[in-house]
Amino acid sequence: MQQTAEQQTGWGTGYVRSISPYVGGKPIAEVAREFGLDPARIVKLASNENPLGMSPKARDAICATLTDNPRYPDNDGYALKQALARKLGVPAEWVTLGHGSSDILEMAARALLTDADAGMYSRYSFIVYTQAIQGVGAQHQVVADHDYGHDFDAMLRAITPKTRLIYVANPNNPTGSFATGDVLHRFLGAVPPHIAVVLDEAYVDYIEPALRYDSMAWVGEFPNLIVSRTFSKAYGLAGLRIGYGVAQPALTDVLNRVRSAFNTSTVAQAAALAALDDQEFLDQSYAINRAGYVQLTAAFASLGLRYLPSQGNFVLVQVGDDDRAGARVNQALLRRGVIARPVDNYGLPQWLRISIGTEAENAACIAALRAHFADD
Ligand SMILES: Cc1ncc(COP(=O)(O)O)c(C=O)c1O
């Protein structure tokens, strides 16, 4: 039998070898090459990016800092942390910057877990939790979902003496499910204080206003809470890799002990700072997302496809009832120049996750789905 490279070399511990590398959405250039398509006509709805691009203020800030990089960035991100603190109403000392919020998620695992501990998350939740926990050799506790969302009572019941860290995404990726502030607050109050909770709010800016809650106040209330957020989604800075975590000083201290040196670039810090106050751009991003949600879900309904309600910038849609359906429909969409996201790696092989794009991008996706199901 052929040996894998790892078996031949013996590199990496068993738990590192058991990590499945993160698979991102397919890049446009790759799909153009593979399917012989014009890249300009390809629509990418695979990575929950902002279809409006980025704030013009961020673009200007990027241009202004491009020539300013012979020196290392500010390792403490002073200006950005001050601005975040003002905006969020928390002390700047509570903020940790990350190269994307994934960096914060990983710092939490590195800082808080050993291979004698366990980290917990829900089934059908963000795959980086699996990797972060596995990366430090800790045990993972995957708790069954409730209707594709978190089952908080089951999570509380699943706590063992080994549990040290719990990840909760709200809204959740890839399902789009949402827990209300009341439910979350009750959960946070019931988690024993020696267990840290990372409340991952990557999609917070897409939550409908009537459903929003004040997680920053909860950081003051719960010394075991880390709230993580990102500039990758509504702020449109995914390519620059910048996000942050907010926690009380004791937790912030340990996050910073494992943070890589100079983990956020000068350009990313400047762009995030400029983007932070562009409320007009954020409002536009929210509005186009809500309109796109209505456009896509109406089309799914008219095609007889089941979808899950989403408070994020993506929708999970069931494209068949056999376990090849996601892969099959994904290929059919790729051939028609639409990149969606298969989610079989999440245990959802009958579904595709479709990011919400501009009206024209959504229309292209809908047309490709219609064409596929008409031919089928
Ligand atoms: C739930 C969730 N958390 C965190 C992230 C991380 O994003 P980033 O590292 O770009 O901030 C994502 C990205 O898709 C996500 O879906």
Image: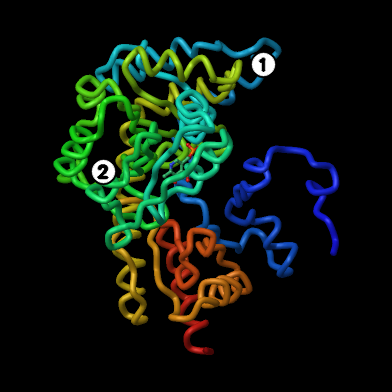
On the picture, is 189 further left or further right than 177? Answer: left
Check the picture and name the quadrant holding the N terminus: bottom right
**On residue 69, which mark appears?**
1
Q: In the figure, 239 relative to 286: above or below?
A: above
- Depth check: give the residue in front, 196 or 235: 196
Seen in the picture, residue 323 relative to 81 is either above or below; the reply is: below
Q: Is residue 351 visible?
A: yes
66 to the left or right of 111: right
Which residue is located at x 51 percent, y 37 percent? 138
Q: Amino acid at mark 1?
A: Asn
Outermost residue toward the bottom? 375
Q: Secondary structure at mark 2?
A: helix
161, 69: nearer the viewer: 161
Do tag 2 and tag 1 residues touch (Cβ < 8 Å)? no
Q: Kindly identify which residue carries mark 2.
A: 156
Nearest to viewer (mark 2 / mark 1):
2
- Measuring from the top left, give residue 46's x and y in whole percent: 52, 57
State the image coordinates of residue 332 (x, y, percent, origin top left): 58, 76
Query: Please, is residue 139 above or below residue 48 in the view?
Result: above
Q: Is mark 1 within 8 Å of ligand 1?
A: no
Q: Residue at x 64, y 54 (%)?
A: 27
